[in-house]
Image: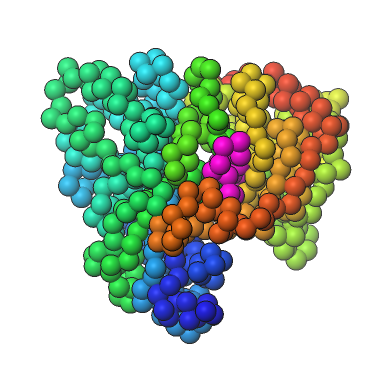
Amino acid sequence: MTAKQTIEAGKAILGIEFGSTRIKAVLIDQENKPIAQGSHTWENQLVDGLWTYSTEAIWYGLQDCYAQLRKNVLDQYEVEIETLAAIGISAMMHGYMPFKGNDILVPFRTWRNTNTGKAAAELSQLFNYNIPLRWSISHLYEAILDNEEHVADIEFLTTLAGYIHWQITGQKVLGVGDASGMIPVDPKTKTYDATMVEKFDKLIEPKGFSWKLLDILPKSLNAGENAGFLTPEGALRLDVSGHLKPGIPVCPPEGDAGTGMVATNAVKQRTGNVSAGTSSFSMIVLEKELSKPYEMIDMVTTPDGSLVAMVHCNNCTSDINAWVKIFKEFQEILGVPVDTYQLYTNLFNAALKGDPDCGGIISYNYVSGEPVTGLADGRPLFVRSANDKFSLANFMRAHLYGAIGVLKIGNDVLFNEENVKVDRIMGHGGYFTTPQVGQKMLAAALNSPISVMETAGEGGAWGIALLAAYAVNNDKKLALADYLDQVVFAGNAGVEIKPDPADVAGFNAYIENYKAGLAIEQAAVDNKK
């Protein structure tokens, strides 16, 4: 079938992902290739000291994103989208969305908030398991510790992906990968860890709430399981033009970490991927559990329930983008025509000419707090001494190193202390847009070969579309890893770059300076309101 025929026949599949700065929709054909897309740009807001997106912004963003997709289809193929083979919804993971009926009780608290330190520490001790600040259970328990009145009224607690899915299907479910960021999942049962649930219920029993934890959590589902169908109301909430028909299967909603694993074919044990954009995280699929909990390593699962060690960093490319904007303004002052893509390309390539250790220069990209390095708040800083080699090449290299510096600190624990073995690490996200540059930097940081596929730029929206395809097109009943290997990627392993020993040594020197200088970052946080 041509793309037009695929759409007309209702065989196309839609994936939508809510990222931190962009909502993206990707339409794929029966061969899993993207044939149309739409997007909507948005920003979180700091309201009463907490990072949030309003429900109005969520629905306007979703509807505008779909409208852009619909326009793209009309422009390319002169056809309306009437029905689809399947839909998938994905979103930034974790956070806190408590509901009574259809009403949200407090504004959505995103993954970016770091106000849950006391709760996360107490739960980590109670469970003997690292519970990150951004997980839903941390937000819930912090609200309990802070005596927030709304907690007694909670009827349903979910993530952003789970919220959208519920509203368009009526089903209170969640893919196991996203569920594992609410409260830990037992990889054997592939649902919430029963022992931890029992401990939590006992912990809060004196509060006398009318609910127990499992009463308010969404049901955890594996990739491929039935997660409901688009309702008439859901169809109108998605497509306000009224062309999209109800009855379309919708796969289990997933978090952006899970869709990143799928989009990079990294759900099999001994594989991994690094997503590097507004935030960054690495996902290494483990052969066995770690020897002990680590505060900087989160244990989540693949969309089919395999155990994953995740190093999540709140900050990545935002500070680079801010500096590139300065260079853009400089060009405009000079009257030089500005091609933003070319500007990024030139500046990223300039970094390749820098010293392997950046000449002593350090960059802290902390737009917000960074739990891995113990910073509750952030101040972007560029640090140099009078004797450092201050050049454009070293300046850019330091920012590229700084964007993945925290990621390196976390992964050094996995590779050096736990001796985790990985056969393949894939990179995806905006950090890798300029060919080879981001790959080379990450290879030096992790001292591991890094591969990037042409499809890496499609990101999580493509990944959730693939999970939707897996739910309806897996005629051979293949396991998810085999489906990706045999059906989607069919031997495409991407382009690999091996680490340069000089770069590895240089990054190691940089990271020692970086760790020593964290006191400067802390002082900046402590002394500036």
The colour scheme applied to this rendered structure is rainbow
Instruction: Describe residue 108's horizontal placement relative to residue 79 as left or right.
Output: left
Question: Residue placed at 54% from the left, 80% from the top?
Answer: 2
Looking at this view, is 395 or 352 the one in front? Answer: 352
Q: Is residue 192 visible?
A: yes
Q: Is residue 475 above or below residue 271?
A: below
Q: Is residue 496 above or below residue 60?
A: above
Instruction: Describe residue 87's horizontal placement relative to residue 460 as left or right.
Output: left
**Residue 295 location in percent, x, y?**
51, 21
Instruction: Describe residue 226's horizontal placement relative to residue 258 as left or right.
Output: left
Q: Is residue 466 above or below residue 12?
A: above
**Residue 485 location in percent, x, y?**
58, 52
Q: Is residue 264 magenta?
A: yes
Question: Residue placed at 41% from the left, 79% from the top?
Answer: 9
Q: Residue furthest front?
A: 476
Question: Residue placed at 52% from the left, 79% from the top?
Answer: 1
Q: How many marks?
A: 0
Q: Is residue 108 above or below residue 477?
A: above
**Residue 18 location in percent, x, y?**
44, 53
Q: Is residue 524 magenta?
A: no
Q: Quadrant of residue 132?
A: top left
Q: Is residue 38 visible?
A: no
Question: Residue placed at 64% from the left, 18% from the top?
Answer: 417
Q: Which residues are magenta?
A: 263-279
**Residue 103 location in percent, x, y?**
21, 48
Q: Quadrant of residue 191?
A: top left
Looking at this view, is 522 or 187 the one in front? Answer: 187
Q: Residue furthest bottom?
A: 78
